[in-house]
DNA sequence: TGAACATATAAGCAAATCGTTATATACTTA
DNA sequence: TAAGTATATAACGATTTGCTTATATGTTCA
């Protein structure tokens, strides 16, 4: 087993996180665009705490990172995570979720904070 | 989005199943070898019903198939599943679990049914 | 046919998960 | 500094999950 091989334990815990439609879609979106919490709230029509809790789980495993920009907190994929290549390869096989961001732009909702 | 693109719903449900260390390891082993239930019981030091229930979940989603051979029921990866390429690509990134089967052979346990 | 073996299923329970509501924290701006 | 906005966290309840024990089903073989 290579030194760089993914451990089963860790792989399982990552897949578990990705095994939720909301988090999986979040990750797919984040793979191409940074997003702030309020955007996710719009996209998923979910409550703010619910979104916040999903993001926390992703953050706790180091899959995403946060960055405050004034009033907003932006999330982005953590490309320095040692498991990023593993994750990236999974995300690459999923259909683009860009339409979800486009909808926001058309509604003008995205502009409000981003 | 390509006609063949994986749906987010389905992808999430597959990743959820793989997000369990026992099932993930099972899938990795099955990707190279057929196995019967009693082998998994040995490998994971788990109860027979517990193993059987994990296999059922994998079977319910069409990830594995079963085949009776006399007294035993052998499980194998269902390569005809439309999501097999998706799964295969994930499994390919995991470390080989062949050592687990080797242990059984050394113990002579594998011979008992296979 | 009956005993032994392999597996599946059912029922019940403890722990984990995910959403909700309520509240705390942090920043911005008037 | 107070009000408004964005986000995080806490506490709680409903649902899901994964194990256990008990039992049913199906096969083999004496």
Image: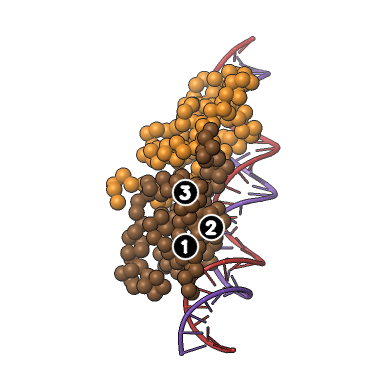
Chain colours: A brown, B orange, C purple, D red
CB contact under 8 Å: marks 1 and 3: no
Q: Quadrant of residue A34?
A: bottom left
Please, which chain is the residue tagged with disc 2 on?
A
Q: Which residue is mark 3?
A: A84
Query: What residue lies at 41% left-to-right and 64% top-to-bottom?
Result: A43
Q: Which of the pair B13/B108 is nearer the observer?
A: B108
Eyeballing the image, is B43 above or below A47? above
Of callouts 2 and 1, the N-terminal one: 2
Question: For mark 1, does the 10 Å Cα neighbourhood hold few (<14), some (14 to 19), or many (20 or more) residues?
Answer: many
Q: Position of residue A6 (x, y in %)?
A: 52, 40
Report, in whole angstroms, how far the alpha carbon at label 3 lies from the one at label 2.
Answer: 13 Å
Query: What residue lies at 46% left-to-right and 45% top-to-bottom?
Result: A86
Q: Position of residue D18 (x, y in %)?
A: 60, 43
Same-chain check, marks 2 and 1 = yes
Report, in whole angstroms, how far the alpha carbon at label 1 lies from the one at label 3.
Answer: 15 Å
Q: Position of residue B64 (x, y in %)?
A: 46, 34
Circle 1 SS class: strand
Eyeballing the image, is D17 above or below B93? below
Residue B63 visible in the picture: no
Viewport quadrant of the C terminus of chain B? top right
Eyeballing the image, is A65 above or below B86? below
Q: Which residue is mark 2?
A: A59
Q: Which residue is mark 1?
A: A75
Circle 2 SS class: helix
Residue B43 visible in the picture: yes
Query: What residue lies at 42% left-to-right and 39% top-to-bottom?
Result: B89
Question: For mark 3, does the 10 Å Cα neighbourhood hold few (<14), some (14 to 19), or many (20 or more) residues?
Answer: some
CB contact under 8 Å: marks 2 and 1: yes
Of callouts 1 and 3, the N-terminal one: 1
Q: Which of the pair A47/A2 is nearer the observer?
A: A2
Report, in whole angstroms, how far the alpha carbon at label 2 lies from the one at label 1.
Answer: 9 Å
Describe residue B106's horizontal placement relative to residue A70 as left or right: right
């Amino acid at each position: 087993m290579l030194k760089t091989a993914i451990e089963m334990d860790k792989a399982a815990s990552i897949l578990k996180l990705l095994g939720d439609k909301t988090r999986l879609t979040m990750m797919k979106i984040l793979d191409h665009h940074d997003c702030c919490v309020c955007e996710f709230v719009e996209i998923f029509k979910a409550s703010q705490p619910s979104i916040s809790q999903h993001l926390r789980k992703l953050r706790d495993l180091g899959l995403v990172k946060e960055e405050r920009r004034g009033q907003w907190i932006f999330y982005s994929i953590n490309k320095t995570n040692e498991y990023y290549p593993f994750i990236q390869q999974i995300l690459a096989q999923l259909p683009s979720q860009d339409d979800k961001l486009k909808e926001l732009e058309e509604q003008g909702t995205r502009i409000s904070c981003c």
